């Protein structure tokens, strides 16, 4: 509630507000709560729009020649993108036209650290400045892990010179709040309530007191309640075993590794292979990467989503307006997903001593099929 109040107060006086914090701390939940509060009170009569940076890159790469120029077949599929999407991302920021967004709108840009990596950082801050300068009634709410000092080269708004005053930092939960959240998440199962009452502080410590990690743990625990061979009482032993294997690692890595290790083999392989996508992806793209039928890919994606391991790519039509020139029409979109950034961040440690690296050339190369972009 305190962070929501701080963001709302900042939006009353500033055109640009940045919500900062590590992955899994709840930045997207916070900006969505703020958006819902503002929408219910009609404080932005011309619209509130949510866009994720990965969706921008996907739309740009699939609908423009610039997005695929100089890329290999694997690049266009998404299975060979580097962490910051390399030349595709730089091309988008360097050549994209600033759209006209008339009226009093709020634009929420999530995952902005993806657009501000390496050489693209200055391009991104300039793009933000141009977007604000050419749309004088527009307000921006950014969610990122790092702070972006907006350039003054293109701005006519004097308040933008002191960006530090607009940053709202989100931290991990205090232990008391973490325990309250964990009790609420596990309240549906009596066996879990007993475990939480006895081992709650240990569980929240394993999760790093990050809301997403506690949601992941609770979903894992609920599924284990139906498993007679692996009762939920053994969950902490599994996490402790991963802590010993990953000596010196910081939470929530051991817990995350234990959750992935407990997945059925086909889901575990699917998740780790999907980390190759640095943009959003749909079922068609996942099917071509994995070399399986579309229906099977859709079932696997749904199962991973139910376990909180995938995020739904929920950017609306505003993403196409920002990513594409006015003369280019975006292809109809299907339900898309993103691998949670904490899984991508800790991917090498999660792989551990596995016998097959799902990101090797041998594992990926046979499944590349560039026709998936046309179908998606």
Image (tube, rainbow, N blue to C red):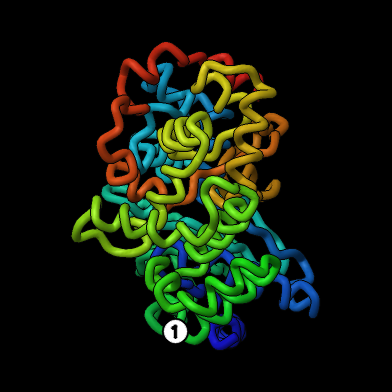
Q: Which residue lies furthest to the top in this view?
A: 366
Looking at the image, residue 78 lies above or below residue 302: above
Q: Which residue lies furthest to the front in this view?
A: 229
The residue that appears at 37% across and 62% down in the rendered structure is 252
The residue that appears at 40% across and 50% down in the rendered structure is 258
Q: Is residue 66 left or right of residue 360?
A: right
Residue 206: x percent and y percent?
A: 38, 67
The residue that appears at 38% across and 72% down in the rendered structure is 205
Residue 37: x percent and y percent?
A: 72, 77
Residue 249: x percent and y percent?
A: 24, 59
Under circle 1, the secondary element is: loop
Which image quadrant is residue 152 in? bottom left
In this view, the residue in front, 270 or 157, is 270
Looking at the image, residue 76 lies above or below residue 238: above
Residue located beneath label 1 in the image:
174
Crowding near pointer 1: few (<14 within 10 Å), some, many (20+)?
A: few
Quarter holding the C terminus is: top right
Residue 298: x percent and y percent?
A: 66, 30
Quarter holding the N terminus is: bottom right
Looking at the image, residue 178 lies above or below residue 154: below
Looking at the image, residue 374 lies above or below residue 44: above
Q: Residue furthest left?
A: 248
Which image quadrant is residue 301 in? top right
In this view, the residue in front, 175 or 101, is 175
Residue 248 can be seen, yes or no? yes
């Amino acid at each position: 509630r305190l962070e929501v109040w701080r963001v709302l107060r900042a939006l009353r006086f500033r055109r640009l507000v940045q919500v900062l914090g590590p992955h899994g701390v709840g930045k997207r939940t916070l900006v969505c709560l703020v958006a819902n509060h503002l929408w219910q009170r009609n404080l932005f009569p011309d619209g509130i729009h949510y866009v994720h940076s990965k969706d921008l890159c996907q739309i740009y790469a699939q609908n423009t020649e610039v997005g695929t120029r100089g890329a290999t077949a694997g690049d266009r599929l998404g299975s060979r993108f580097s962490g910051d999407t390399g030349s595709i991302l730089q091309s988008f920021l360097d050549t994209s036209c600033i759209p006209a967004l008339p009226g009093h709108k709020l634009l929420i840009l999530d995952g902005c650290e993806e657009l501000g990596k390496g050489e693209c950082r200055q391009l991104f801050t300039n793009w933000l400045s141009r977007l604000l300068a050419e749309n004088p009634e527009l307000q921006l709410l950014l969610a990122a892990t790092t702070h972006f000092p907006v350039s003054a080269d293109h701005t006519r708004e004097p308040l933008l010179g002191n960006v530090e005053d607009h940053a709202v930092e989100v931290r991990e939960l205090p232990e008391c709040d973490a325990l309250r959240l964990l009790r609420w998440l596990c309240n549906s199962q009596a066996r879990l309530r007993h475990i939480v009452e006895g081992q709650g502080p240990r569980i929240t410590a394993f999760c790093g007191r990050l809301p997403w990690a506690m949601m992941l743990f609770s979903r894992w625990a609920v599924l284990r309640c139906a498993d007679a061979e692996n009762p939920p009482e053994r969950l902490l032993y599994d996490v402790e075993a991963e802590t010993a294997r990953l000596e010196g690692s910081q939470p929530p890595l051991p817990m995350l590794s234990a959750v992935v290790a407990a997945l059925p083999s086909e889901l575990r392989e699917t998740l780790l292979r999907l980390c190759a996508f640095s943009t959003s992806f749909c079922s068609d793209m996942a099917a071509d990467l994995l070399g399986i039928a579309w229906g099977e890919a859709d079932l696997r994606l749904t199962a991973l989503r139910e376990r909180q391991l995938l995020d739904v790519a929920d950017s609306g039509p505003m993403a196409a307006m920002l990513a594409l020139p006015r003369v280019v029409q975006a292809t109809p979109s299907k339900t898309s997903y993103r691998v949670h950034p904490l899984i991508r961040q800790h991917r090498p440690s999660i792989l551990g001593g596995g016998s097959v690296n799902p990101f090797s050339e041998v594992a990926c190369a046979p499944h590349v099929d560039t026709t998936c972009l046309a179908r998606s």
